[in-house]
Amino acid sequence: MCQHCAHPPCVDVCPTGASFQRADGIVLVDRHTCIGCRYCMMACPYKARSFVHEPVRDQRPEVPRGRGCVESCTLCVHRLDRGGTPACVEACAAAGHQALLFGDLNDPTSALAQRVAREASAPLRADLQLAPAVRYQGL
Ligand code: SF4
């Protein structure tokens, strides 16, 4: 999945500014300005982006998609901006697993930041110094 790097190479290489980082750190693609060049797909060391080859039917207005654009995990910003959580986190909790947690790493008082401070976790490919926002336990 997109690791929502603090220093995202996809944003660095994007010629149109379609790849961008929100103030809260979430990395997104603006489908209105993406020209489908796929430079970001080559730049991403996590292979997290996909190109939409086929027309997309049954669109959901809160999650627009489009043929000829690149897309990746958005952390469900449409849900976050309404005070919700990512759908995968909700589904995992509903299944009783609690394997996925979500929170604000930049807020030291958040439950997630405190757990990251308390328990060992690691990002993928820390050697690349991209500072991914996603942490894993038990790697
Ligand atoms: S495919 Fe779109 S988002 Fe990716 S680098 Fe090209 S214009 Fe930017």
Image: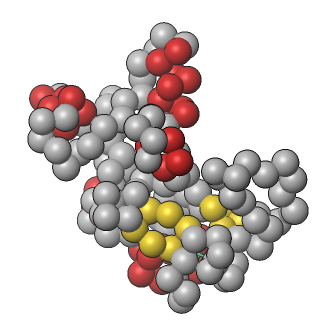
Q: Does 88 sit left or right of 26 as displayed? A: right
Q: Residue furthest top?
A: 96
Examine the rendered structure and indicate whether residue 30 appears above or below residue 77. below
The image quarter containing residue 64 is bottom right
* Residue under the image location 51 percent in, 74 percent down: 19
Q: Is residue 5 visible?
A: no
Q: Is residue 28 visible?
A: yes
> x and y percent of residue 4 in the render?
40, 57
> x and y percent of residue 41 in the render?
59, 70
Ligand 1 is found in which quarter of the picture? bottom right
Q: Pick whichever, 135 or 32, lies toward us.
A: 32
Q: Pick whichever, 79 or 94, lies toward us.
A: 79
* Residue under the image location 55 percent in, 23 percent down: 91
Q: Does 66 sit left or right of 2 as displayed? A: right
* Residue under the image location 30 percent in, 38 percent down: 103
Q: Does 19 sit left or right of 23 as displayed? A: right
Q: Residue furthest front?
A: 82
Q: Does 21 sit left or right of 121 as displayed? A: right
* Residue under the image location 21 percent in, 29 percent down: 111
The image quarter containing residue 52 is bottom right
> x and y percent of residue 114 in the render?
15, 32
Q: Residue furthest bottom?
A: 15
Examine the rendered structure and indicate whether residue 30 appears above or below residue 116. below
> x and y percent of residue 51 in the render?
71, 66
Assign the C terminus to one quadrant of the image: top left
Examine the rendered structure and indicate whether residue 78 appears above or below residue 26. above
